[in-house]
Structures are given as structure tokens and as C-alpha cells.
Image: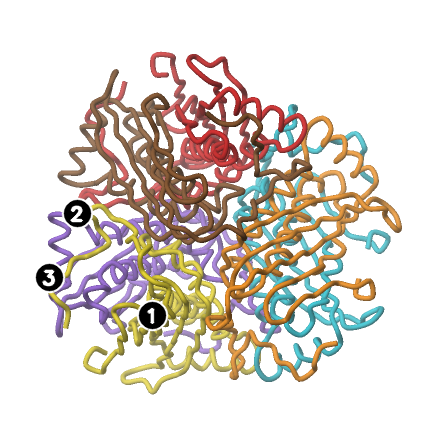
Chain colours: A orange, B cyan, C purple, D yellow, E red, F brown
Amino acid sequence: MTDSHETLTHFDEAGRPRMVDVSDKPETAREAVAEARIRMQASTREKIEQGRMVKGDVLAVAELAGVMAAKRTPDLIPLCHPIPISGVRVKTAWEDAAGAGAVLRIEAAVRTTYRTGVEMEALTACSVAALTVYDMCKAVDRGMVIEQIALVYKAGGKSGVFQRTDAQA
Amino acid sequence: MTDSHETLTHFDEAGRPRMVDVSDKPETAREAVAEARIRMQASTREKIEQGRMVKGDVLAVAELAGVMAAKRTPDLIPLCHPIPISGVRVKTAWEDAAGAGAVLRIEAAVRTTYRTGVEMEALTACSVAALTVYDMCKAVDRGMVIEQIALVYKAGGKSGVFQRTDAQA
Amino acid sequence: MTDSHETLTHFDEAGRPRMVDVSDKPETAREAVAEARIRMQASTREKIEQGRMVKGDVLAVAELAGVMAAKRTPDLIPLCHPIPISGVRVKTAWEDAAGAGAVLRIEAAVRTTYRTGVEMEALTACSVAALTVYDMCKAVDRGMVIEQIALVYKAGGKSGVFQRTDAQA
Amino acid sequence: MTDSHETLTHFDEAGRPRMVDVSDKPETAREAVAEARIRMQASTREKIEQGRMVKGDVLAVAELAGVMAAKRTPDLIPLCHPIPISGVRVKTAWEDAAGAGAVLRIEAAVRTTYRTGVEMEALTACSVAALTVYDMCKAVDRGMVIEQIALVYKAGGKSGVFQRTDAQA
Amino acid sequence: MTDSHETLTHFDEAGRPRMVDVSDKPETAREAVAEARIRMQASTREKIEQGRMVKGDVLAVAELAGVMAAKRTPDLIPLCHPIPISGVRVKTAWEDAAGAGAVLRIEAAVRTTYRTGVEMEALTACSVAALTVYDMCKAVDRGMVIEQIALVYKAGGKSGVFQRTDAQA
Amino acid sequence: MTDSHETLTHFDEAGRPRMVDVSDKPETAREAVAEARIRMQASTREKIEQGRMVKGDVLAVAELAGVMAAKRTPDLIPLCHPIPISGVRVKTAWEDAAGAGAVLRIEAAVRTTYRTGVEMEALTACSVAALTVYDMCKAVDRGMVIEQIALVYKAGGKSGVFQRTDAQA
């Protein structure tokens, strides 16, 4: 549970947005893992899997787009620090879908040794990978939904380890 | 309903990714509207609303980040065309949340007069606006989830009007 | 004189920032010219002029940086439209300085055929060219001041021709 | 006073531009503060202040644009190093204007722990914030002038502290 | 054969670099095809081909990097116009190598309907695809050489069709 | 000679592209030097040399474009790490051409103190400098060929010193 007295640190005392000063924080090893899910028609999943076999690998393109997007995070998220990320890994896997259609799970893990964490990089990688799947399949399935973008795990830094629980999910 | 015989046009006959050639398509007025939802603790919503009143407007920063992200779409989505977008609008509103916590809805509308549509621009604007909310509130609520990024409406171009229905949502 | 009843069109009726929709505006030829001045020590001017002769041409680097910056304008100015600029020219010239030191004038002219004007592109080109002069000379003259960035001329579009007058300067 | 024998280090012995090698410089805490001023009609100031109250906050958008621009500095200034900036703060305040109209002062402060300083980042943040004010108000006041972009303060690194004096201003 | 009296149009009469004004040129369909070759050890080719079968497709990553780089051309080449490219295709194929080792040929084709051509976009796509191959294989073959980046074909615009001949190659 | 058992480390065990994790590698001083050659008509060389004397310095623009491109490397090469490069130098020189026409050699040297090397930054700088020469001269010599982009030297890091030999060239 969070303390309701905590304040949003991205604003100064007059309410101006700022990039929080992390000059005094030590450089420590950090890692973050995030996930996204995208729900689609079963026939769209079939097309993607056929492509993976024969020609046109949607998932490989999406994974690569996710890795590249992690590097663009500070350009996109206004108050994010530029971070020398030291490793990025994006992977996709089909899930047993509750409900109609098919569900693809995307997971991104990012590492750095720096003064602040890489949650936003992992979340951005997931999001852009999911958007890339949408882009490549939208001509056959405009109703796809990106369902659940969330932080799964985080380690390093003063706030310690965060591990998503089922209750949260 | 989509035709299961349609192919994924972002690959050529040998399975190589390509930016689809739209040279022969006419320039027509196009619009796309997309949405995202982000679920958070009720106490996080309180902090955001207090900021909006007094100091530190999370939602204004997120809306602006969404507008700017729409312009970066071709840098992020590998096979997207660069598009001269002619208007972008991002807005946020609190929803009656089914289930625990609070839910913020983000809607982005993008317009252009061009050879291809702006669905990806609208979806990217929504996604980055939602990620920006996460970034600014993560210190108080790391368990926030971006729940539902989807296309709401699309007009213009050969494929005509798309309007999301409840069944799809 | 401006009409005090005009509103700031970059916000919607609820105060949200937006990229103004120009879809319905016709494509017309447009041009904008902007200027900047940078005041420096006379000895700094000497160093720049020696470099131009012999080695290390500060002004050529600054002019090129200005041309390139015009292309980055929509990445920098949040509500600017991406514009297919069709020509950019940046030039520098020494002025007779009123007051101490030396004054370099930078002028940028930008052209397009599009739905909205290129004032911001011209102003951004000037500004970045001036910042580049500062960067290259700061080790010898940290007190340089960029004194006057202003629109000089604008043509095309519904608002017609703007020509800066001395009274304005 | 500067030493007239110093050379412009951004060029090599043959006059080629280069990014100066800072590999051998130690990482130290550094800070830079810069400012810009923008002069406008009194009626434009009124519109901005009304927006801040009711709807459409020009100054909040400009401050955010300044923070984001600090991160783009190495993309804009040709020979600037990429720097892991650790904090950025941009603020605006109205000044008692000498002369006609109203004057807005913009101040940007940037911090890092690195091998070279952040003057250019602070100056770029100021400049882009000022350009953003111009963009949002140009429809009502095309004659606005950005009057004075200058370094105010600098600390850290071998060259030590720089503090702008009135004589310089 | 070129006319030795032609001048380099990227400079004005005083030698300043400029983005050439194309405002008065009509929008016409244009296409450019470029190629690059990269020579490597035969054992490196084997590794790439094994990856293509089983895991880790170097060529797919390189082709995608080429498509994306075509969009970044105006950010990289100082005096290039931003161009609304309407289609990009990058493909790779092994060649019968004259001399030692293996040779991969990369071909990029770019199309637009605009006022100026897309040669630079095609050449940039080829170059970055080749650099990406180098990056992914450098740990096993640091001596790879990118041997021949050249324009193959160009159509559209006032200068008409260009077709590379063997004499040129 | 390379060990045929080495694997391509840019892919994980399932063949997914990844940015290799360098978190555990120490920060060490590193340097890389790369080169490119561009072959052109003798008359094109004459035009470039006349420009250098009088007006319009193609080589200065290309050198600067190379320096700036080194900073964009992680945006272009999908699996490259963002690296805090600490120095970049690009230089051009005419070579005695074997065969017809004239040959310009471009050399880029990049330095950093970091966990991974700067070969790709040096190669990207060379490549973009060569493309910039092509861009500025293409109106007079469309048949120019970029002939040989290669790593010349590399020092620092676990793999030690690499020095290109004639046999390799």
C-alpha cells in the first residue's frame, strides 16, 4: 500500500514539471520487466503463425521494434532521464486466451547500471512492440485490443524490489 | 468480419518486411480516433486531481506528450509511412470504474489529408499519454495497468468507416 | 494592431493543448524570414574571422546547424505541424555594433507549399545557429548574449504578408 | 577577461570541426543556469494570464518543451557531446518591463555528473521554451521578440564558477 | 556524361550551404534503387545462413533497419529535403563472390510522389542495412568490408531516367 | 582467423534479437577508427576543390555530417547500445586513385570510456560523410560509388586491439 502523503515528485513546489534531479543517487545495477497483451481474432493469430513459418514474421518485427523503442524512451516520455541502458530483451508468446480470440503476451526486460530505474524503458518497449503487431495486422483485424500493459518486476535502487502479484493483475 | 484469405501486406512475396507502396492511392481526408484506459489506486487519482487544482498537472503533461508522440509514430513503428498529420487532439477523462480503483480514459483524434490513414498515430498518441501518466505517478502507485488501447473510429480511404462496437470492446 | 478578442487557438474549449487542425486550409506557397543577433567580445569576433580565413569556420558550421534544425522544428515545438519544407537558407553577417563588442546577425529564410506557415522553422533555424556560435566560442567568451530573435517577414496563407517595421524592432 | 591567445578548440589543427575529446577529464558534478527573455504586447500577456487561470496554459507547455529540448541538445548543436543529464528545471516569470509591452523571463537549470558541462543544454532549454511561447501566441502577436538568451551561472569542471554580472548583462 | 559547367547547387553564390528550394518543381512519381555489397569470411556467411534457418535472422534485422533508416535520411544528410516517402523495399541476396570469402548484395528501392527524388533515401537504406550486418557479425568477423554503395536506377523528375551501366560498376 | 564455433551474440537461445547485456563489463577507454572511400569523376573532384577554395565546401559539410551521425548511431543500428561518446574526429583526403577518376578517403575516429566499443559509431560516421558527399555532388556525377567502408583500428575492451592489415584490405 502506498502512503497517501507522498507527493508527485515530477513537479516542483510551484507545480512546474521538472526532470527530477538524481545527481546525488549512486549508480547501481537495475532491472525492470514489463508486459503487454494484445487480443485478436483467432484467424489473425493463424495468419501470424503462418507467416512465422513461411514468410513475413510479424513477431520478429515487433520484438525488434520493442528493442529500438526502449532507446527512444527519453524522447517520448517528457520527464524521463536519458539512461545508458545496457541490455534489452523483448519476447512474445501465445497465451491460453480466456474469452474469445487469441492473446499474444509481450515481455520486455531492460537493464542498466545508473542512478535511476528502467521501468519506463521496459513499458515503452512492450507498448511499441504491441503497436507494431497492431500495425502489421490491422488490415485483417482492426478490432485488436492491447489489453494490459503493466510492470511485472523491478529491482535495484532505493525503493527495492517490486514483484507484481496476482491480486494486482 | 474480415476475409480469412487476406494476406499481411507488410511483407513481400518472399516474406521480407516492407513499407507498403501507397504511391497510387489518392490523397483523401482521413481521421482516426483511439483510446486507452489506465487503472490505478483511488488514492493516486486523488493525488492527480489535487495536482490539477493546485500544482502539478499530470493530465496536461500527458495530453501534451500524446500530441508530440503522434509526430514520432514513423520513428517508432517500423513500417509506418511518414504522414503530414494536419491535426491532433488528446483528451483525458475519469470514468466510473468497474472494479477496484480509479480509471482514466485517454482519447486521441488525428486528422490528415493523405494517401494512407492515421490509426497508428492515434494509437501511439494514446499509448504514450498513458505511459506518461504511469511515469509521473509510478512513485506512488507502481501497480497501475494500462488496460485497453484500441481503435474507436476511422474514416477515409478505401476501407471506409470503422466504428468500434460494444461487442468488440 | 491585434484584436484583443482573438483567442489562443492552440487550446481547445476546455484548455487542452492541441495541434490545430489545418485539414481544410489550402496548400499555398509560403515563406518566412527570421533573424537573431549574438553579441560578443571584439576579440571573439577576431578569432572567428581568423578561423574563417585559415582554419575552423565557426560561421559555416552555424549556418549548417541552422539548416538542419529547421527540419527538427516539429520535434521541438510541441504543437507545430510536421511541414514538408521545400527550401532553407541561413546566412550570417557582421553588423556595425551599437554598444560594446561585436554583433553577428543571422538570417534564416524557409519556404514551403503547404497548409500552414514556416515562421517557427525560420525562428528555430536562427536560434540553433546562434546557439551553435555560442557553443563553439564559449571557451573564449562565456558572456556572449543572443540578443534579438524575431520574425522579419512572412508571406502566404490567409493572414497575408507580415513585414517587421523599425518601430517593432 | 579572456585570453586572446586561446584558440577555438572545436577545430583541429587543419580547421576541421570535431567533437572535442573529453575522455581524460574526470566526471564531476556540474550545473548551468541560462535565461531568455521574450517581449510581447501587454494584451498578449493578458491572454496568457487568462489562459493560465481558466484554460490553456501557455507557460506550462513552454516549460515542458524546454525540459524536453534539453534532452535533444546533442541532436541540434553539431559538436555537443551526448550528456547523461541528471536534472532539468525550467521556470517562467513576468518581469517589470523597461519599455513598451510585457516581458517574460525564462530560466533553465540543468545538472549532470559528467566529463563536460551543461551550458548548452540550459541555453537550448531556454531557447526552445521561448520559441514555444512565440508559437502559441503568434496568431495574436507576430511581433514578439526573444531578447536576451544568456548564461547566468555555471559551476563544476576545470574552468570553475561563472556568474553573470550586471556589466555583462 | 555530365556537363562540366554545372555547379554544385547545394551552395549559394557566396558558398553557403542551403537546402535547395524546390517549391516551384511539380510533384511527380519518382523512384530510386540503390545497392551495397558487403564482403565477409565464408564462415561468417555460414553462421548467418544457419541463423536464418534455426534462430537469429541477421538478414531480416538488416532489411528492417534499412527500411527504417530510409525514414531518417533528412535527419542524417544535412541538405536533404524531408520527403513523404510512399514505399520502401529492402532485400538481400548472396552473390557469387569474385575473390575470397562471401558477398551479400543489398538492394533498396524507394518511391515517392514529390518535388524531389529519393536517391539519398535508397542509398541510406542500403548503407544502414549493411552497417547492421556488420554490427551483428563483427564479433566473429571484424574484417568485413562494405564494398560498393551505388545508385542503380532512378526515374522521375526533370533529369529523367538513370540506369547504372556495367562500365560504371 | 575466427572460431567457427562462436555464435552470433545478438540473438538469444530462441533466435530473438536482443541488445546484448553489458552490465557486467567494466568501463574502459576505447577507440575505433573506420574508413570509407568514394570514387567519382575527375571533373567532380575539380568542382569540389574549386568550392573548397572559393565557395561551397563539400568536404567541410561532409565532415560535420559524419560527426553528427556518430551521435545518431543507436537510432539507426537496431541492437547498438546508446554510448556516451567522448570524442569524434572525421577527416577527408584525396588519394592517388588506382583506376579511373578520383578517390576521396574519409576517416572517422571515435573515443569513449564505456562498457562496449565504438566501432559502429566510427563506421556510421564514415558512411554518412560519404553519403553527404554523394548528395552534394549527385547532380553532376550520379555514378559515384562508395567503395570501401571498413574498420581500420580498434582498441580497448576484452577483445583487445584490432589493426586492419593489407591482406584484409
Label 1, on which residue? Answer: D143
The residue mark sitting in front, 2 or 1, is 2
Percent position of residue E11, x then y: 24, 41
Numbered disc total: 3
Residue D7 higher or lower than E68, as above or below: below
Name the chain under label 2.
D
Q: Amino acid at mark 1?
A: Gly
Residue F38 higher or lower than D26, as above or below: above
Q: Amino acid at mark 3?
A: His
Label 1 packing within 10 angstroms: few (<14), some (14-19), many (20+): many
Label 3 packing within 10 angstroms: few (<14), some (14-19), many (20+): few
Residue E35 higher or lower than E14, as above or below: above
Q: Amino acid at mark 2?
A: Glu
**Contact (CB < 8 A) between labels 3 and 2?**
no
Q: CA distance from mark 2 to mark 1?
A: 44 Å
The mark that comes first in sequence, 1 or 3, is: 3
The mark that comes first in sequence, 2 or 1, is: 2
**Do the residues marked 2 and 1 share a common chain?**
yes
**Contact (CB < 8 A) between labels 1 and 3?**
no
Name the chain under label 1.
D
